[in-house]
Amino acid sequence: MNKAKSKKNKQTSHIWGGRFKKDSSEIMKIINASIWFDKKLAFHDIALSKVHSNMLWNKGIILNKENKKIQKGLSIIEKEISNNKFVFSDELEDIHMHIEVRLIELIGDAGKKLHTARSRNDQVATSFKMWVRDELDLVLELIKKVQGSLIFQAQSNINTILPGFTHLQPAQPISLAHHLLAYVEMLGRDKSRIEDAKERLNKSPLGAAALAGTSFPIDRFATAKALGFKKPMENSIDAVSDRDFVLESLSSASIIMVHLSRLAEEIVIWASPGFNFINLPDTFSTGSSIMPQKRNPDAAELIRGKTGRVASSFYNVLTMLKGLPLAYSKDMQEDKEPFFDAFDNLKLCLKVAEGLIREVEFNVEAMKSMADLGYITATDLADWLVKECNIPFRDAHSITGKVVKHAEKHKLTLDKIAVEDFKKIDKRITNEVLKVLSLKNSLESRDSYGGTSPKVVKKALKNAVNTWLKS
């Protein structure tokens, strides 16, 4: 037992233990270890290590036979991890040490040369950037699928009328397709934020070493290109201490979740009996353990609930970074757990949202019935008074308010008020007013750019397909 422990401690000393007489305490090993979460970076670390080794050989820093051994050993490790045969342990802090120690076990002294002209500082930053870059690509694809579900539903509901709300009060008639396309636009901005973040993060830290660069004749441009980066980072200190790419990505994730949460909140409201705008699919709702009649919108509620979890990850990393002097500090190890958790939940919520939206059924008649409430063509009356009677809008607003008061008193919709009663309120009103008070006419009249008329919405749908689904 003691021999096994001694052997493990000796393994640790191969990496950084030469300065120390005693091994770390067991509790220090626990707080210092990141292997149980940063092993996600294994394949990216192997990829950058292969590129780094090739560069060392091309620059004459290591021999060809040494590079070949390193490449073969890294491929063996890659296969071991893929087949779940790789052994992880607290004795070796992180995935980078695990791979290096295993490489030395496999190929001997050649493995000890891999870390020439690099540090774990630039190694960690590079592998994490590569992982984040791949995650952002996955999120872009998932957003596209959610947009696809929204567009799919919108295509069948161009002429479906529902009340548009302000302050959660019925405001004006809108097309259901127009409402759904609002979320398509929101998610489109999310995609542009991610693309911007990708553009900024796509510079390689590799070769910055600990913080000051290296005296070896390395080629940072070659390694950057081989790893898919646009170029190397310009400042070696910034290269190892920068975590803007983490903050930007988490900020974008938080905004995406806020947009999903707003949609989820509407699903929760619309599924309630008071609204009855939608029927929840069996596949994305749950029942009650005690109330047999219940159909709960748990999928939407969990999206709403996880929004705080993702947003808190952003604040977690922001707070961790706020007091750090340059360059690298171990605090920065705390950037990965919140990031991994946030993006795992973001991807899950996008997948759930895509399926839920595609399978939900809309109750068109219930939407139309609520649209008949709340006098939501009142603005159309005010606009008509301005256009046809040359009445200043503020006066038209006041006259319309009196009409609504009359309708409330007599429990009438605006289009059911007799023309004679309109004239009693203002003698300038004519029979023509009845043409603008129906929900259909109101909807069709909103034909300004970006408006809710079916004619405009058809064009918007076509544009949405071309912009978001064909790109």
Image (cartoon, rainbow, N blue to C red):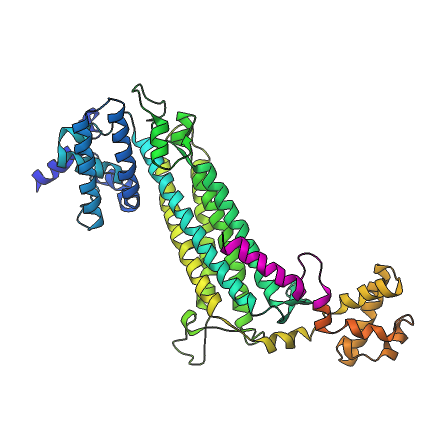
Q: Quadrant of residue 174?
A: bottom right
Q: Nearer the viewer, residue 412 or 208?
A: 208
Residue in the picture at 22% in, 44% down? 78
Magenta run includes residue 149? no
Q: Quadrant of residue 54?
A: top left
Q: With 44 as the anchor, is 67 left or right in this view?
A: left
73 is higher (above) or lower (below) than 436: above
The location of residue 242, given as percent across then percent down, is 42, 33
Residue in the picture at 28% in, 33% down? 51
The location of residue 382, given as percent across then percent down, is 81, 65
Magenta run includes residue 465? yes
Residue in the picture at 43% in, 79% down? 291
Q: Quadrant of residue 412?
A: bottom right
Please state the extent of the stretch shown in magenta in the rendering.
444-471
The location of residue 217, given as percent across then percent down, is 30, 20
Q: With 78 as the anchor, is 322 left or right in this view?
A: right
Q: With 380 as the anchor, is 133 left or right in this view?
A: left
82 is higher (above) or lower (below) than 397: above
Q: Is residue 94 visible from the viewing direction of this image?
A: no
Q: Nearer the viewer, residue 37 or 71?
A: 71
Residue extending farthest to the top is: 215
Q: With 399 as the anchor, is 318 left or right in this view?
A: left
Q: Nearer the viewer, residue 346 or 228?
A: 228
Q: Is residue 153 visible from the viewing direction of this image?
A: yes
Q: Nearer the viewer, residue 12 or 221?
A: 221
Residue in the picture at 28% in, 25% down? 117
Main secondary structure along the magenta-highlighted residues: helix
Instruction: Report the number of discs.
Output: 0
The location of residue 1, given as percent across then percent down, is 8, 42
